[in-house]
Structure formats: C-alpha cells, structure tokens
Amino acid sequence: MLNTALRFLDYFSAPASVSAHCDLPCGVYDPAQARIEAESVKGCMEKYAGTDDHDFKARAVAIKEERAEMVKHHLWVLWTDYFKPPHLEAHPELHTLFWEATKLAGEVKKTTDVAKADELLSAIAGIDEIFWATKN
C-alpha cells in the first residue's frame, strides 16, 4: 500500500516534460479555408440585399460577422504558423497583403457592401498565389 502511495506521489511530483509539435507545413495549411469563409461572407451580403425580411437580414448579418471573424482566424494562423522569414524575404509584399486582408475581414463585419467582400476575396487570392509558390 505504501509503495502504491509513493508511486502515486512520484507521478504527480515529477517534472512535466513538454515537447512542441512541428508546424506540419506539409499540407495542413491552406488559404482555401479563409477563401471559403470569405465566400460565405459575400453570399450572406448578397442574400441580405435580396430580401425585405427583417429576421432573415438579421440572421444574414450575424452569420456574415461570424464568418468574417473566421476569415481573420484562418489568415492569422497561416501568417503566424506557416509563413517563415525566408518566405517574407522572397515575397516582401506578404506583410502588406496579410495586413490588408485582415483589415478587410474586419471591415466586412461593419458593412453589407458586396464590393468589400470582393476586395477581401481579391486580397486572399494574392496570399493564395504566394502560398502555392512557396509550397512548390
């Protein structure tokens, strides 16, 4: 009984070992996730413009804002986890592209202007182009 108690105490008093996993840039990351959410944002804006139903408009706005936040999330993960200094050296416009895309993702939360959603999709397309250039 004493042995069991001591092993139990050893288990909880032992220093924790921590190890980091790799970023898995071998296929986990893809700007398509941000693009799909941005397309959802645009779709919600189009549906909002196409109806007079107040409840439907309220739901479209709520979903649009949620999806816009997801765009920002997917872009930030891509920016902070996938892209590395050598990518930025080879593509110095990356910082500006990400800054503009995440700002646009915030702006589409405040509007139902489909043109803003198109700007967001265009910014994501620029990131997508560089992403695939770095993957090959």
Image (cartoon, helix red, strand yellow):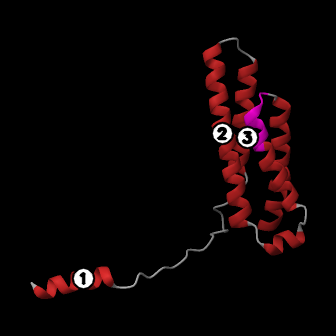
Q: Mark 2: which secondary structure?
A: helix
Q: Looking at the picture, does residue 128 appear above or below residue 36?
A: below
Q: How many marks?
A: 3
Mark 2 vs mark 1: give the one in front. Answer: 1
Q: Over which residues does the magenta segment extend?
A: 105-112
Q: Report if residue 30 is visible in the image.
A: no
Question: Can see residue 28?
Answer: yes
- Identified by mark 1, the residue type is Leu
Taking the image as shown, residue 58 lies to the left or right of residue 14, namely right
Residue sitting at x 77%, y 49%: 102
How many residues crowd around disc 2 within 10 Å: few (fewer than 14), some, or many (20 or more)?
many
The amino acid type found where label 2 is placed reads Arg
Q: Residues within 10 Å of mark 3 (few under 14, many from 20)?
A: many
Q: Secondary structure at mark 3?
A: helix
Q: Earlier in the sequence, mark 1 or mark 3?
A: 1
Q: Which residue is mark 1?
A: 9
The Cα atoms of the two marked residues, 1 and 3, are separated by 52 Å
Please provide percent x and percent y for residue 111. 78, 30
The question of residue 74 being in magenta is answered with no
Image quarter of residue 79: bottom right
Residue linked to disc 2: 67
Q: Amino acid at mark 3?
A: Ala
Labels 2 and 1 touching (C-beta < 8 A): no
Residue, x 68% and y 52% (percent of image)?
74
Q: CA distance from mark 2 to mark 3?
A: 7 Å
Residue 108 drawn in magenta:
yes
In the rendered view of the protein, which quadrant contains the C terminus? Answer: bottom right
The residue singled out by tag 3 in the image is 38
Dots 2 and 3: beta carbons under 8 Å?
yes
> In terms of secondary structure, where does tag 1 sit?
helix
